[in-house]
Image (cartoon, rainbow, N blue to C red):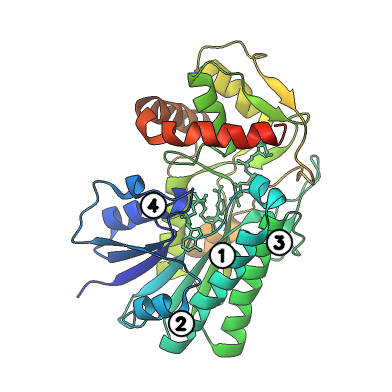
């Protein structure tokens, strides 16, 4: 019998990328547990083999449902891969409540089930738990950087990481953690920076840059995030944290200008809008441990090429993003951004 993975949030951007990666590179069966919030879509799982992927629509904080799904995961190689989260900083500034429910109570509910059944657990987290770096600081985040989250989103992700670490230490849960930098690629919700600007440009609307645009993010293709998570699941040491990044630091201004070039517009054809409150200046990952200990390396390290392919994907998949676009922009308009 092939191994069986429970992927929470598997109908979202990174979760569905991970499910595709698993199907292509292993013989595992996958159960997706996803609440299908505004960020999740069955379209993200279209075309996948139904004999290997099953979608269960539900909440990771529903203890009875989680018990039913985790109880059978006792075979060699079976695991929970926990991607589900409320994931957008801007939303967390306007209504933190769902972030506490999903990121904290949801993670707790899954950990309790993993504890009861001895199930292997991998927790997907973010570099934002470490707070911000100065623009000109020589260092990058490592596995020993102290936690210093800035937003309700990153605070709840930091809290979820600490729960996982405590469940490893106190209860012997067989868990690993990964903290990844900013992802881009197909199927990312139009509320996020890169898809927002691409889809606005398709509509002839100028990109919106928060503040000065000097803020730096460390971009990695979602496919590389997925390959790193599978590597950690298969080879990572229990109790360890691995940072995932692909040396992709770029200022937001550079990203907008690259997009404008790729889409045939003048490089100053964008607007500055009011900054995000508490906006972290810079994130940057030192992925040495993952590369040296587990031998992982990215397969799409060329950001400009990856971005061009992503623009192409959004151009070819208007039916995928169009239904979300007006609502996402209406939210931004209400917030003055
Ligand atoms: P996303 O918002 O695109 O997807 C989240 C998914 O979780 C959606 O399908 C949603 O329906 C589901 N979900 C939300 N609440 C749920 C609940 N209570 N029960 C079940 N399902 C629920 O997010 P994403 O960008 O794919 O992020 C996935 C994970 O990766 C998150 O844990 C996030 O913190 C982490 N991460 C994201 C990035 C990034 O750049 N996007 C970078 C590093 C880490
Ligand atoms: O319109 C915009 N203009 C703009 O300048 C938007 C939506 C964003 N920005 C800026 C804010 C950030 O500096 O772009 C940068 C990226 O913004 P987001 O896409 O909202 O991502 P970020 O806040 O960096 O968080 C992302 O990476 C880490 C994900 O959303 C998180 O889930 C992940 O943990």
User: Which of the two labelled residues, at mark 3 and mark 2, occupies the earlier sequence position?
Assistant: 2
User: Which of the two labelled residues, at mark 4 and mark 1, occupies the earlier sequence position?
Assistant: 4
Q: CA distance from mark 2 to mark 1?
A: 15 Å
Q: CA distance from mark 3 to mark 2?
A: 23 Å
Q: Residue at x 53, y 87 (%)?
A: 172
Which quarter shows the N terminus?
A: bottom left
Q: Residue at x 66, y 63 (%)?
A: 156
User: Which of the two labelled residues, at mark 2 and mark 1, occupies the earlier sequence position?
Assistant: 1
> Tag 2's secondary structure?
helix
- Say which of 87 and 179 sits in front: 87
Q: Residue at x 71, y 50 (%)?
A: 93
Does 233 sit above or below residue 256?
below
Quadrant of ligand 2 in image: top right
Question: Which residue is disc 4 drawn over?
Answer: 16
User: CB at mark 4 closer than 8 A to ligand 1?
Assistant: yes
User: CB at mark 1 closer than 8 A to ligand 1?
Assistant: yes
Question: Which residue is disc 2 drawn over?
Answer: 113
Q: Residues within 10 Å of mark 1 (few under 14, many from 20)?
A: many
Question: Which residue is disc 1 drawn over?
Answer: 102
x, y percentage for residue 181? 60, 49
Question: Which residue is disc 3 drawn over?
Answer: 155
């Amino acid at each position: 019998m092939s191994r069986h993975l429970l992927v929470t949030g598997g109908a979202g951007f990174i979760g569905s990328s991970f499910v595709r990666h698993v199907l292509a590179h292993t013989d595992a069966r996958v159960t997706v547990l996803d609440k299908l919030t505004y960020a999740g879509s069955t379209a993200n799982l279209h075309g996948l083999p139904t004999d290997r992927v099953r979608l269960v629509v539900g909440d990771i904080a529903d203890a009875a449902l989680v018990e039913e799904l985790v109880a059978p995961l006792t075979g060699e190689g079976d695991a929970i891969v926990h991607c589900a989260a409320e994931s957008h900083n801007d939303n967390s500034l306007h209504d933190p409540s769902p972030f506490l429910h999903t990121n904290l109570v949801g993670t707790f509910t899954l950990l309790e089930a993993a504890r009861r059944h001895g199930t292997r657990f991998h927790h997907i987290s973010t570099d934002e738990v470490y707070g911000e770096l100065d623009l000109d600081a020589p260092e990058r985040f490592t596995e020993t950087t102290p936690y210093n989250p800035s937003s309700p989103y990153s605070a709840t992700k930091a809290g979820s990481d600490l729960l996982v670490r405590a469940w490893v230490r106190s209860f012997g849960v067989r868990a690993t953690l990964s903290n990844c930098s900013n992802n881009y690629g197909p199927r990312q919700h139009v509320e996020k920076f890169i898809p927002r600007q691409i889809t606005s440009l398709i509509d002839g609307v100028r990109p919106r840059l928060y503040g000065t645009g000097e803020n730096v993010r460390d971009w990695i293709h979602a496919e590389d995030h997925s390959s790193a998570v599978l590597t950690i699941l298969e080879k990572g040491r229990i109790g360890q944290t691995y940072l995932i990044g692909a040396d992709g630091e770029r200022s937001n201004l550079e990203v907008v200008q690259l997009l404008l070039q790729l889409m045939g517009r003048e490089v100053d054809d964008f607007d500055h809008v009011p900054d995000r409150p508490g906006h972290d200046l810079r994130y940057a990952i030192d992925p040495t441990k993952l590369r040296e200990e587990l031998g992982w390396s990215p397969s799409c390290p060329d950001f400009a090429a990856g971005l061009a392919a992503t623009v192409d994907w959004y151009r070819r998949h208007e039916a995928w993003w169009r239904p979300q676009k007006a609502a996402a922009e209406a939210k931004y308009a209400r917030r003055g951004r």
